[in-house]
Amino acid sequence: MPTYIVSAAANRLTQQMKQGIASRITESHSDATGAHGFFAQVIFQDIAEGNHFLGGSPLKADHIYVHGHIRAGRTPDQKRSLLDAIVSVIVAAAATERRYVWAYISELPPSQMVEYGNVLPEPGHETEWLDSLSTEDRAYLLGIG
């Protein structure tokens, strides 16, 4: 369901930082939305030197960007809580200042998303969705994380 893409300068984030960020973004998403952690994926993208500009000039600061694609239907409070948590996760795990963290959430209708081979449920119907899957698929999902 949610896909979080974390972009930073190449070699800015260590493997340990990435693991911490991925774990904590997953927890933050679950805490804010109530969705199972197996729905959250975190993808890291390294930005090569000279490939990032801000205001038309080469980036000179330590910016880290998180763009989350989530299912539509969350409340404004849930989204605000999630954004606040994501910023705190990045600040702590990457040892950076809040001013260098940019976070965005984009919403997609569940009916336009397929994950694990199935159209996704509306928020709040994850349990029924999970129960409707085959025993093998359900076991696979519950074994993630």
Image (cartoon, grey):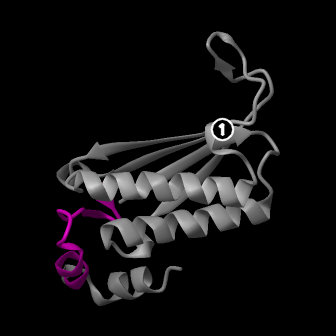
Residue at 33 percent across and 72 percent down: it is 35
Seen in the picture, residue 32 relative to 102 is either above or below; the reply is below
Seen in the picture, residue 75 relative to 47 is either above or below; the reply is below
In the drawing, does residue 9 fall left or right of residue 90? right
In the drawing, does residue 112 fall left or right of residue 31? left
Check disc 1 and report the residue beneath it. Answer: 100
- Which amino acid does the dot numbered 1 rest on? Tyr
Residue at 69 percent across and 24 percent down: it is 52
Residue range of the region highlighted in magenta in the rendering: 114-131
Numbered-mark total: 1
Quarter of the rendering occupied by the N terminus = bottom left
> Callout 1 environment at 10 Å: few (<14), some (14 to 19), or many (20+)?
some
Foreground residue, 45 or 135? 45
Tag 1, which secondary structure?
helix
In the drawing, does residue 92 fall left or right of residue 114? right
- Please tell me whether residue 128 belongs to the stretch shown in magenta: yes
Residue at 60 percent across and 59 percent down: it is 89
- Please tell me whether residue 42 belongs to the stretch shown in magenta: no
Percent across and percent down for residue 114 are: 29, 57
Foreground residue, 95 or 37? 95
Percent across and percent down for residue 92 are: 68, 60
Foreground residue, 96 or 130? 96
